[in-house]
Image (spheres, rainbow, N blue to C red):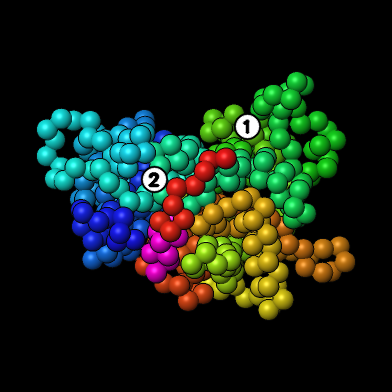
Amino acid sequence: MSGMAAGRSEKVRIAVVFGGRSAEHAISCVSAGSVIAALDPDRYEVVRVGITRDGGWVLADAGQPLAITDGALPEVTGGTAVSLVGDPAGRGLAVLEPGAAIGPALTGVDVVFPVLHGAYGEDGTIQGLLEMAGLPYVGSGVFASAASMDKEFTKKLLAAAGLPQGDHVVLRDATGAVCPDPGLLDESARERLGLPVFVKPSRAGSSIGITKVTDWAQFPEAVATAAAVDPKVVVEASVPGREIECGVLAGVDGGLPQASLPAEIRLRPGVDWYDFSAKYLDDSVDFDVPADLTPEQTAAVQAASLRAYQAMDCRGLARVDFFLGTGPDGSDRLVINEVNTMPGFTPISMFPRMWAASGVAYPELVDRLVRSAVDGGSRTAR
């Protein structure tokens, strides 16, 4: 990689992009803080690029906190205004404030690590921007990012690959257009889905905007909550079973992708489901890393994860989430819940913990992702 930085320094200049316009802004900041801390300063020169909640790109100050402190969530609030250079010859960022004292010019970025979750980051939008700029970047390309972010199309692609998933309904009007109207879920659909159901924004993460509905009287409010995050709303039947996750990582030197040891999320007594607070704020869940599975169950989860990764055309990394229950005949029933193309990288996030249990420590994991992006070069958006 040092060849890309020739003439400037022997270090690889990596732009770590975080924050963003989605509801997962704070979690992106926390993930970025962990990634930056893991990058070897003897090998990498880090450019911290924050995106504010209203979409402004700034060169973030190194002293800006990127961690949850006493329950307070971090946020990108300001810095020197910058912009990505769309011309591939520019290969980097341009400063929008003439005369700003920021040190060396920000041209010649070697690779971008878009540690962005949710809309305008994990959904193919920034990937398209980076494709136009001709910059290598960590993670999946435009199509895989967009399709994996949209729960409706994730389910369609997984179904086409013969992978199991739970029953669900996408709310639409009579013309087929997205229209999250509670009245559109007719009685037959309600009987088929049963209770409880989970009402979700189709394009969001970190359990933001999700409601567990245990009585149909709660349904209109749940739809309104989800629609406030995304106009497309998905209603999913509850799938009983253990919550299992598995990480997938691009192979070394162009080799085949690999699956990590799976992990299990166990809710403590009194915790109803794995919502935002349980994920990031409360000490209300236990993580078994690796999960207590039989060798056969582990192999099945890993095989399904790799199939899902390939079915969604992922690159670099992904986290595949499952429910592991029991089928009508008493055999294991493995159901895919979702595919995450940029899973959390916070200190407690499952993706790095699963790989640590699989023998790939956090700094090595981050380094491997960056090397994979640089070696792969700029990908086509098609």
Q: Position of residue 313 (x, y in %)?
A: 61, 51
Left or right side of 313 for 84: left
Q: Which residues are magenta?
A: 364-373
Res. 108 visible in picture: yes
Crowdedness near tag 2: few (<14), some (14–19) or many (≥20) residues, C-alpha within 10 Å? many
Q: Which residue is mark 2?
A: 135
Residue, disc 1: 232
- Helix, strand or loop at mark 2: loop
Amino acid beneath label 1: Lys
Residue 352 part of the magenta segment: no
Inter-mark Cα distance, 1 to 2: 31 Å
Picture coordinates of residue 39, whole percent (x, y):
31, 62
| Residue appearing at x 74%, y 52% in the figure | 161
Residue at x-position 77% and y-position 63% = 333
Disc 1 packing (10 Å; few <14; some 14–19; many ≥20): many
Mark found first going from the N terminus, 1 or 2: 2
